[in-house]
Image (cartoon, rainbow, N blue to C red):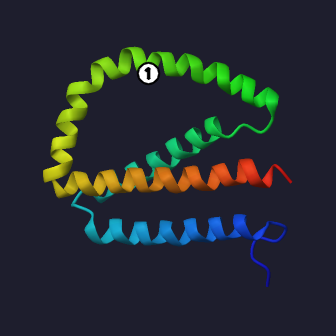
Amino acid sequence: MKILPGLNFKVKSTVIFAGVLGILLMIFIILKSPENYAFTVSLSILGTIFGWVFAFITSPYDKADKERLNNTTKVFGSFLTGYVISKADNPLRSFANKVITDSAIQCYAIAFIGFFCLSWLVVYVFRVYVNAH
């Protein structure tokens, strides 16, 4: 039985690694999640969605796609650096202090960041390496 036929070893190993890590991360979330389990799972899903979008933006298929994404990211980047960062300094500082001391928020952060990274990794690998062949 072949697993993921037609893909090279690097892509297969990335997908399998991400799948195993995702399962382990979900087990960690189930075991360590505070009472608000549904919120933690929602943050995991949100992290996955944001990771997918970020991977989509950082890995264009071709030159035309790169040009379209480049224009979009310039507009979004200008908004992000100009307005959002100037308004987000104090809330981010407050959130960082809570992450250090509150185990529930630590679990939320691990769920979001973990699934963001896994999603980004898998989508990036497929867009860059599978499309290239």
Residue 26 vs residue 102: left or right?
right
Foreground: 100 or 104? 100
Residue 50 vs residue 70: left or right?
left
- Indicate the secondary structure of the residue bearing disc 1: helix
Q: Quadrant of residue 122?
A: bottom right
In the image, residue 86 sits, relative to residue 58, either above or below, namely: above
Residue 24 vs residue 128: left or right?
left
Quadrant position of the N terminus in the picture? bottom right
* Residue at image point 56% right, 65% down: 18
* Residue at image point 56% right, 49% down: 120
Q: Dot 1 surroundings within 10 Å: few (below 14), some, or many (20 or more)?
A: few
* Residue at image point 77% right, 39% down: 61
Q: Position of residue 81 (x, y in %)?
A: 42, 20
Q: Position of residue 76 (x, y in %)?
A: 53, 21
Q: Position of residue 24 (x, y in %)?
A: 43, 72
| Residue type at the position of mark 1 | Leu
In the image, residue 40 sits, relative to residue 10, either above or below, namely: above
Q: Quadrant of residue 34?
A: bottom left
Q: Which residue is mark 1?
A: 80
